[in-house]
Amino acid sequence: MPKRNLRIVKRVRNVPVIGVCEQCNTQFFGDPTQGNAQSAIQGQFNAHKCEKKVAETSARA
């Protein structure tokens, strides 16, 4: 399982706007027009708790 790391997945004019947690794939968004997108994304990441994702399996007959 990947470690709990923040990965920036989208940038607009070299300003991060979307990040994801590599462990639980939760997405975090920043507003590039506010000038603090990086810190907003980092703050959301730091505040979140990873939730275990339960894989759905279907029984096949």
Image (cartoon, grey):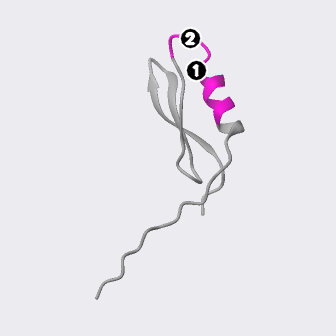
Q: Which residues are magenta?
A: 32-44
Mark 2 secondary-structure assignment: loop
Residue 42 part of the magenta-drawn span: yes
- Image spot of residue 6 (x, y percent): 61, 41
Mark 1 secondary-structure assignment: helix
Residue found at x 50% / y 26%: 17
Residue found at x 58% / y 11%: 35
Residue found at x 68% / y 47%: 49
Q: Residues within 10 Å of mark 1 (few under 14, many from 20)?
A: some
Q: Is residue 1 above or below residue 58?
A: above
Quarter residue 56 falls in: bottom left
Residue found at x 68% / y 30%: 43
Amino acid, disc 1: Ala
Q: According to the image, label 2 marks what residue? A: 34
The N terminus - image quarter: bottom right
Q: Residues within 10 Å of mark 2 (few under 14, many from 20)?
A: few
Amino acid, disc 2: Gln
- Could you tell me how far apart the alpha carbons at marks 1 and 2 are, in whole angstroms? 7 Å
- Image spot of residue 7 (x, y percent): 56, 41
Quarter residue 26 falls in: top right
Which sits in the foreground, 58 or 50? 58
Q: Residue furthest right?
A: 46
Q: According to the image, label 1 marks what residue? A: 37
- Image spot of residue 20 (x, y percent): 54, 41
Contact, mark 1 vs mark 2 (Cβ under 8 Å): yes
Horizontal side of residue 25 vs 43, given as left or right: left
The circle on residue 22 is: none
The dominant secondary structure in magenta is helix
The C terminus - image quarter: bottom left
- Image spot of residue 23 (x, y percent): 59, 54
Q: Residue furthest bottom?
A: 61
